[in-house]
Amino acid sequence: MRVFLTGGSGYIGQATIAELVKQGHTVDALARSDRAEATVVAAGATAVRGGLGDLAVLKDAAARADAVIHLAQAESGDEDLAAATAMQDGVGAGTYVHTGGTWVYGDTDGVVDETAPWNPPAAVAWRKPVEDAVLAHGGRPVIVQPGLLYGGDNRLIDVFFVQPGKKNGAIPYIGDGANHWALVHIDDLAPLYVAALAAPAGSVYVGVGGVNPTAKQVAEACAHAAGLAGKTTSISLEQARAEMGPIADAFALDQQLTPAKAERELGWQPRHTDPLAVFAQG
């Protein structure tokens, strides 16, 4: 299958290109710079020069493909929807896989699945109209909603918790740290995107590992990996907002989600079931 992919030079994109190639697919990947082009080519894809705002490029590349996987992070909901619409128009009856995220469910009050009501923090509230429009467009839309990523570059957790913690001598967590994080390892998420190419039209899958440790547990494990002898510190939500911006409210969510639907319908099985051990190794 020929797959057109956006966001190929990013954290998730490089892993997904590698998995697609491993499973025998041919990949064309959007690249907006020389550096991005070199990255996607090294990962195994053919570069398509352009950005998310180049709607004609997106539509033409999608029209040449059998399926599309949209991983790139848009600047706004309007940009994301415009790009999605162009690619859905281009790919026609082919599968279009759109990226969402589990933060849209807000606090879950226990373990939930894709049927849970949405209660998104402000940082991701824009996703609702985009995902609704994608599913209503026609063709073969599929949405994958990754949990909080870890493994590899581990960017969000590293940027907002580990790096500040190294500077201050203790890894922070918000409040009492008892809130759960719905995590997914990058090496599990990439195969889910590939599996989603065969999903029924209109399907939505949360991409989580099914193990939901608390934020404090993650902080403690990261503190061991950082050479801080497990030292952590509590910060208030107000302090977190001042230091992190609106994403602090997402990190403060108490989320537990199950991958049962993707396991049942796609045969996808998360292999990384001990995230704290991964965090502790650094």
Image (tube, grey):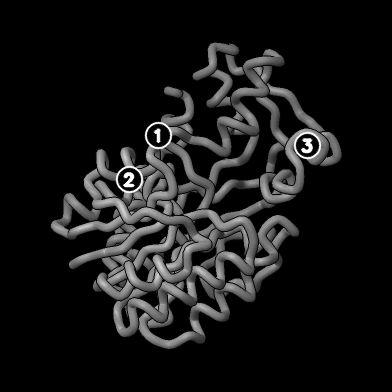
Q: Quadrant of the C terminus?
A: top left
Asked which secondary structure carries label 2, the reply is: helix
| Disc 3 residue type (three-letter) | Ala
Q: Earlier in the sequence, mark 2 or mark 3?
A: 2
Q: Residues within 10 Å of mark 1 (few under 14, many from 20)?
A: some
Q: Is residue 22 above or below residue 125?
A: above
Q: Which one is in front, 276 or 64?
A: 64
Q: CA distance from mark 2 to mark 1?
A: 9 Å
Quarter holding the N terminus? Answer: bottom left
- Residue 101 image position (x, y, % from top left): 54, 59
- Residue 67 percent across, percent down from the top left: 29, 71
Secondary structure under badge 3? helix
Q: Choose the circle earlier in sequence order: 3 or 1.
A: 1
* Mark 3, residue position: 240
The residue furthest right is: 238
2 and 1 marks in contact (CB < 8 Å): yes
Residue 164 occupies quadrant: top right
Find numbered disc 1 in the image and state the secondary structure of the residue it sits on: loop
- Where residue 263 sits, quadrant-wise, is bottom left
What amino acid does circle 2 point to?
Ala
Q: Which residue is mark 2?
A: 15
